[in-house]
Image: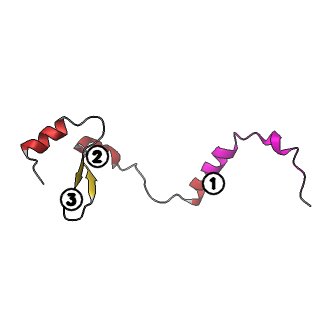
């Protein structure tokens, strides 16, 4: 665990709506600081960030096209 300096703690307290970002000076990587409660909410067991399954992709495609106005396609010439 890393403890913040007084200056860093003040910067966190004065942070507006966006989570504070910190940069590792060795690697130049940027990190976002989250409160433990926010982090735990994002990493709950029901959160799934695995690749989408074929069934999920098909369901998403169906949701997208079921609201389409198919009448506009009635006037298109048929391909032979």
Q: Circles 1 and 3: CB distance less than 8 Å?
A: no
The residue at the point 10 percent across, 42 percent down is: 7
Quadrant of the image containing the N terminus: bottom left
Residue with the most extreme left position:
6
Q: Which of marks 2 and 3 is in front?
A: 3
Q: Is mark 3 on a helix, strand or loop?
A: loop
The quarter of the picture where residue 63 lies is: top right
Q: In this view, does 17 lie above or below 33?
A: above
- Spatial separation of the CA atoms under disc 2 and disc 1: 30 Å
Q: Is mark 1 on a helix, strand or loop?
A: helix
Sort mark 2 into few (<14), some (14-19) or many (20+) by Cα contacts within 10 Å. few
Is-magenta flag for residue 77?
yes
Name the residue carrying label 1. 58
The residue at the point 69 percent across, 39 percent down is: 67
Residue with the most extreme bottom position:
27
Left or right of 67, for residue 15: left
The quarter of the picture where residue 8 lies is: top left
Name the residue carrying label 2. 40
- Please provide percent x and percent y for residue 23: 23, 55
Is-magenta flag for residue 23?
no
**Total numbered circles:** 3
State the extent of the magenta-drawn residues as a range: 59-78
**Considering only order in the chain, which callout, 3 or 2, is on the residue closer to the N terminus?**
3
**Considering only order in the chain, which callout, 3 or 1, is on the residue closer to the N terminus?**
3
């Amino acid at each position: 665990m890393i403890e913040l300096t007084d200056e860093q703690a003040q910067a966190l307290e004065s942070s507006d709506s966006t989570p504070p970002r910190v940069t590792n000076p060795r690697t130049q990587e940027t990190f976002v600081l989250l409160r433990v409660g926010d982090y735990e909410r994002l990493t709950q067991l029901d959160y799934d960030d695995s690749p989408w399954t074929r069934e999920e992709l098909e369901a998403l495609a169906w949701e997208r096209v079921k609201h389409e106005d198919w009448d506009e396609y009635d006037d298109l010439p048929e391909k032979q």
